[in-house]
Image (tube, rainbow, N blue to C red):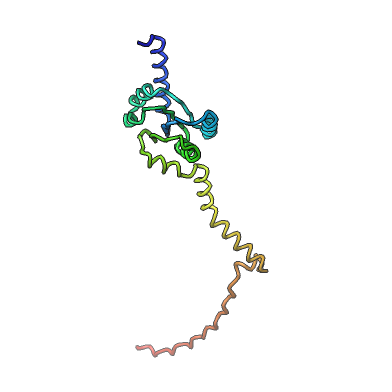
Amino acid sequence: MPSASVLEQNKKVVADLVELLKSAQAGVLVDYRGITVEQDTQLRNKLREAGVEYKVVKNTLTRFAANEVGFQELDPSLHGPTALAISSTDPIAPAKVLSDFAKDVEAIEIKAGFLDGKVISLDEIKTLANTPSREVLIAKIMGSLNSPISKLVRTLQALVDNGVEPSEIGNAAPEAEAAPVAEEAPAAEAPAAE
């Protein structure tokens, strides 16, 4: 039977993990069996750069924390060596970094994940990993908002380059000459009836 100090340490680890899971936007469980120390260091650096917290916690302690948060669907994935990558700011980062790393290092196996308080499937993790980053999405939106203005500027510049004066742009169509209006002949007055 574990000593009282070990039990207290485990309770603290579970409590910290519960808080981490509650505050997380997304997380991914991976099997890291078979990677070298150098590969593990590279993975940790990439996750750190993306703002993702990476932890290796005993499966039993992770199970207690996951069950307390409502992630019972993670139980079948909590066997063998398991690491947890969690982000509280970017829901795409854990899946993206781990999927990209798994392409180069076949030993990494994604087991399960969660997003916004729900456990998600491996297919959903792959879809999430293929989603462009927040910065790319913002750049695409800004580009589409900027496009009409850019086209207008290029059109105006082309007119100026072709010798059209800016003052002539609004007066491109010649004014139509006014047709003379025929004067009406005065109507003959009818005699007034008395």
- Determine the residue positioned at 48% across, 88% down: 185
Q: Position of residue 74 (x, y in %)?
A: 34, 31
Q: Quadrant of the N terminus?
A: top left
Counting from the top left corner in percent of width and height, residue 35 is at 49, 31
Q: Nearer the viewer, residue 104 or 130?
A: 104
Residue in the picture at 54% in, 51% down: 143
**Residue closer to the observer: 184 or 53:** 53
Q: Quadrant of the C terminus?
A: bottom left
The one nearer the camera, 188 or 53, is: 53
- Asked where in the image residue 33 lies, by quadrant, the reply is top left
Task: Count all numbered tags in the image, as a single digit.
Answer: 0
Residue at the top extreme of this rendering: 4
Q: Residue 46 or 181: which is nearer the viewer?
A: 46
Q: Residue at x 38, y 24 (%)?
A: 59
Q: Where 83 sits versus 139, above or below?
A: above
| Image x and y of residue 154, in percent | 60, 61
Q: Position of residue 60 (x, y in %)?
A: 36, 22
